[in-house]
Image (cartoon, grey):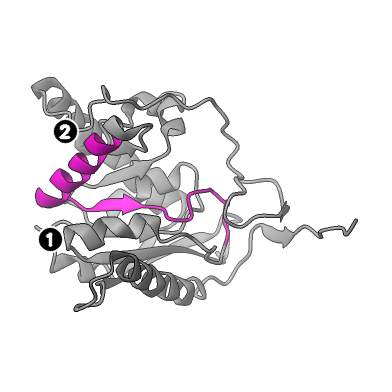
Amino acid sequence: MEKRRVIYYSDELNDEFSSFETIPPKIDGSYDYERKALPKRLSRFFLYRIVMYPIVVFYGRVIFGQKIVGKEKLKQYKKKGYFLYGNHTQPFGDATLQTRLPWPTSTFIIVHPNNLNVPVFGKWTPSLGGLPIPDGMSAYKNFLTAIRNKISEGHPVVIYPEAHIWPYYTKIRPFLDTSFRYPVEIGVPSFCFVNTYHKRRFRKRPKMITYIDGPFFAPEGETDIHVKQKNLRDQVYDHMVELSKNSDIEVIKYVRKEVSCA
């Protein structure tokens, strides 16, 4: 578990505390987001359902004792696409444990290109549903098309709007409304989930309880897309803040650095 007990930060929007550092690959117009070729589809089925999911269940139940609250809220959209927004507090866990929420429906997840360079699992990222953020307009068009297609096929798309990992952080950091343009434009619901941390009697590693809430929709009758995505962002943010209050242990204390005046 993370050995540091105190972490000092200066920028809630941009500070990153993941221990993994690498030069991200460029995602250009040649990147295959759709992966429709038969070998790639078979690879996804094998890695996602046969190899990875048993690991995820073990990791969630044994390592974190994960309990999921509110999963029934997703069932009414079992065969429909939607967006899932979560807090970003686990390097490996966030990439994998989200698959348990709508199971057996498989998810796709928007990831930073750094994930493609993670040892071992990086090569699996595309097969496991990772959609890396693109570079340039040609790649961006393919990226948006892939998101629309996954949604139309009934798959949830997972987004961590905080963008940067703060291990075991028990509050919700401010985040932009940029990623809320997707559900507004496509016209599908959004849900949020928050991983909270709780004391365990005989183990130092805290128990994880994941709370799900939603669905959330942009206001009807509003024509300005910027107003709609901000409204949706605020709904999700406010509910995530309330859910985060369920944590009852602080494994790592985050302290804002004092800014010295010249």
Residue 43 location in percent, x, y?
19, 26
Residue at 23% x, 47% y is 107
Which sits in the foreground, 120 or 107?
107
Q: Is residue 11 above or below residue 199?
A: above
Amino acid type shown at disc 1:
Lys
Please state the total of marks drawn on the protein image.
2
Residue at 9% x, 48% y is 153
Task: Kindly indicate whether the residue at mark 1 contacts the one at mark 2 (C-beta within 8 angstroms).
Answer: no
Q: Is residue 150 above or below residue 229?
A: above
Residue at 52% x, 75% y is 245
Q: Is residue 187 left or right of residue 216?
A: left
Residue 255 location in percent, x, y?
73, 61
Residue named by callout 2: 45
Amino acid type shown at disc 2:
Phe
Q: Secondary structure at mark 2?
A: helix
Which sits in the foreground, 200 or 239?
239
Please check the rendered image and state whether residue 107 is part of the magenta-colored stretch, yes or no. no
Which of the image's four quarters has the C terminus? bottom right
Regarding residue 212, the answer to whether it shows in the image is: no
Residue range highlighted in magenta: 140-169
Q: Rounded to the nearest whole Å, what is the CA distance between mark 2 and mark 1? A: 19 Å
- Mark seen at residue 190: none
Which sits in the foreground, 140 or 23?
140
Regarding residue 262, the answer to whether it shows in the image is: yes
Residue named by callout 1: 78
Q: Residues within 10 Å of mark 2 (few under 14, many from 20)?
A: some
Looking at the image, which residue sits at the far front? 224
Residue at 19% x, 40% y is 146
Please check the rendered image and state whether residue 168 is part of the magenta-colored stretch, yes or no. yes
Residue 168 location in percent, x, y?
57, 56
Q: Secondary structure at mark 1?
A: loop
